Image: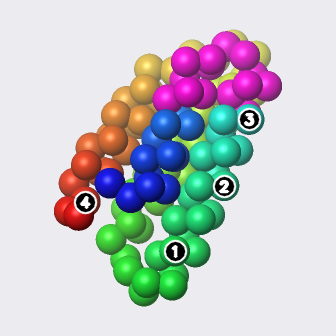
Amino acid sequence: MNKWTYAMIERLESAYKVRFDKEAVLIFLNDAYQNALMLRSEELREQNDRYDAFLEEFDHTRDLFVSQAVDRYPSNYNKVAEKISDLKKLSESFAY
């Protein structure tokens, strides 16, 4: 697993653990986004497209998480947990 994908998943899981503390969630999600930017720049340098699906899934997961974090009455954290699990599966499928 790439160091950036690992860090992104770790930040998402940390955000999920504190999901009812909006400020902490947004901090972890911002950290994950910064890791995604590093992965994107690394991907461009290597001219490698194997992370496209992972990054697309990450963006969708982050957006869903943010919408739940800022919602007054969040109701879809189970979907967020499912999306994090999907990201783990995607990242484990990378051969190193």
Q: Is residue 84 left or right of residue 21?
A: left
Tell me which numbered mark, 1 or 2, is placed earlier along the sequence. 2
Q: Secondary structure at mark 2?
A: helix
Query: Which three-letter amino acid code belongs to the residue tagged 1?
Result: Glu
Q: Secondary structure at mark 1?
A: helix
Q: Which mark is residue 94?
A: 4
Is residue 63 shown to the viewer in this render?
A: no
Query: Which three-letter amino acid code belongs to the residue tagged 3?
Result: Ile
Rendered position, 26 above or below 91:
above
Which residue position is annotated with label 1?
A: 42
Tell me which numbered mark, 1 or 3, is placed earlier along the sequence. 3
Instruction: Considering the whole magenta stretch, tell me its main secondary structure.
Output: helix
Q: Nearer the viewer, residue 63 or 89?
A: 89
Q: Secondary structure at mark 4?
A: loop
> How many numbered discs sit on the rendered protein?
4
Q: Residue 59 in the image: state x and y as whole percent.
A: 54, 52
Tell me which numbered mark, 1 or 4, is placed earlier along the sequence. 1
Contact between marks 2 and 4 (CB within 8 A): the answer is: no
Task: Identify which residue is drawn at 37% across, 44% down.
Answer: 87
Count neighbours of disc 4 (C-alpha within 10 A) and say few if under 14, some if 14 to 19, many if 20 or more: few
Q: Which mark is residue 34?
A: 2
Which residue position is annotated with label 3?
A: 27
Q: CA distance from mark 1 to mark 4?
A: 15 Å
Which stretch appears magenta?
A: 13-26
Q: Residue 27 in the image: state x and y as whole percent.
A: 74, 35
